[in-house]
Amino acid sequence: MEGDSPKGDLPLRDFYIPDYIFTQESEKEDVPEKPTCPVIVFVNSKSGGQLGGDLIKTYRQLLNRVQVFDLGEEAPDKVLHRLYANFEKLKSDGDKLAVEIERTLRLIVAGGDGTAGWLLGVVCDLKLAQPPPIATVPLGTGNNLPFSFGWGKKNPGTNHQSVKYFLDQVKKAKEMQIDSWHIVMRMRDPKEGTCDPIAPLELPHSLHAFHRVSRSDSLNLEGYHTFRGGFWNYFSMGMDAQVSYAFHSERKLHPEKFKNQIINQQTTYAKLGATQGWFFASLFHPSSRNIAQLANVKIMRRLGHWEDLHIPRSIRSIVCLNLPSFSGGLNPWGTPNQKKARDRDLTPPYVDDGLLEVVGFRDAWHGLVLFTPNGHGTRLAQARRIRFEFHKGAADHTFMRIDGEPWKQPLPVDDDTVVVEISHLRQVKMLATHNCISKSIDDPLTPSSASHHDDGDSSPESEDEWEGGRRKFGAAETFKIPEDTDIAHVS
């Protein structure tokens, strides 16, 4: 199609990938210069209102059309499986360009945090010898992943100049590892009450039913539901997840009211928080909503050693944080002073240290503290693993959220066998600008005092505990958007 090819636009040759790299049927093309930063672009066309569709159009005009994929038409796991299979064939035929493109390939994903997490999960699951690093374009509501790595949180420009500037930043970006976290949730079928299994479309795309647990698992019995998945940014439960659930429900009913990104993040959330009584939680909400009343929380600071985590009785929301960005750029952990950090044996919050920062909030007023200089939540712990064991009959439901995607979680009233456990999985490469807020333990510009680096989960139970499910995180059936799911439901 006229205007879709970059052949007359020499600067973009740095990013160009010819057709035959993607499909064996295409005729081999002579490329005069090897691309210095070949890219593949994935865009959620339903994100950001019309912006997703506009971005696809611009990228296809500036690059080769075959480099730009609409996630509403083709899933990233299928694209990357096909691409890397073709890489292997081309390399066996002695194709030097294919070798160079595979070595220097970078991925771009435009969408909300859910879309970005989808692609990260796929790359993580492929276990490639040379996994490509990923840059994220902010095209959602929270945009915590892009903000954490320096790509901003405002929706991008879609014209040629804006896209060219972004591509230039991708070429200059540094690589940084990021931890991924595995989550498993098990619950028994209720003997009484209204606790029904969650409808698949009500779950986050990263959390799916997985009925086989392991041969030695005591919960591997008839009458149990097991869900597995993963996250990159955070898992939260309680007050914040309930407000987020109300926001997403309202947006599904009235999408025309949610076109303004700033209004989405601030005004609407504040309104919903007020109407649900979270600014005066002690008056309007029963104590059964408090985390300590709802569940017993255990953490693992050292491998193989579980300990109870003390949760103050006033805490109504708990956040397990991997990145320094939550709810659109806020940092609940903050920066503890040196004395507090030393007294509590806290390390800097690195994104690749195998530790989660666990933070609590009392009410919506407490959450507003994050907007003040040096504001933070109640720092509860840093942990390698965390487990929630729900008390018998404490409540018939609670609200949970993974990377911005909330759901209403029913709880059985007849037994205390609902368990949510989070553990470190592995890492994937991100692309970061040089002024990003995320910090790495391997960055020479950051302190070297991190003594909790996790080289992987080597506890004795890990190999059997997660057998058959724990290693499947992205392209696997347990962690991807089903083909019949409307991608409009993914942020």
Image: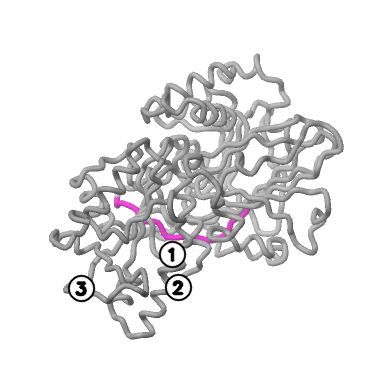
Q: Main secondary structure of the magenta part?
A: strand
Q: Amino acid at mark 3?
A: Val
Residue 71 percent coordinates (x, y):
42, 51
Q: Is label 1 in a helix, a strand or a loop?
A: helix
> Residue visible at 46% across and 35% down?
327
Q: Quadrant of residue 447?
A: bottom left
Q: Is label 2 in a helix, a strand or a loop?
A: loop
Mark 2 vs mark 1, CA separation in Å = 13 Å
Q: Quadrant of the image for the N terminus?
A: bottom left
Tell me where the magenta segment starts and ends, as one range: 423-434
Q: Which residue is mark 1?
A: 80
Residue 349 percent coordinates (x, y):
48, 48
Indicate yes or no whether the magenta region holds residue 433. Answer: yes
Q: Amino acid at mark 2?
A: Ala
Residue 113 percent coordinates (x, y):
45, 44
Dots 2, 3 in contact, CB < 8 A? no
Q: Which residue is mark 3?
A: 31
Which residue lies most toward the top here? 283
Q: Which residue is mark 2?
A: 129
Q: Nearer the viewer, residue 341 or 77?
A: 77
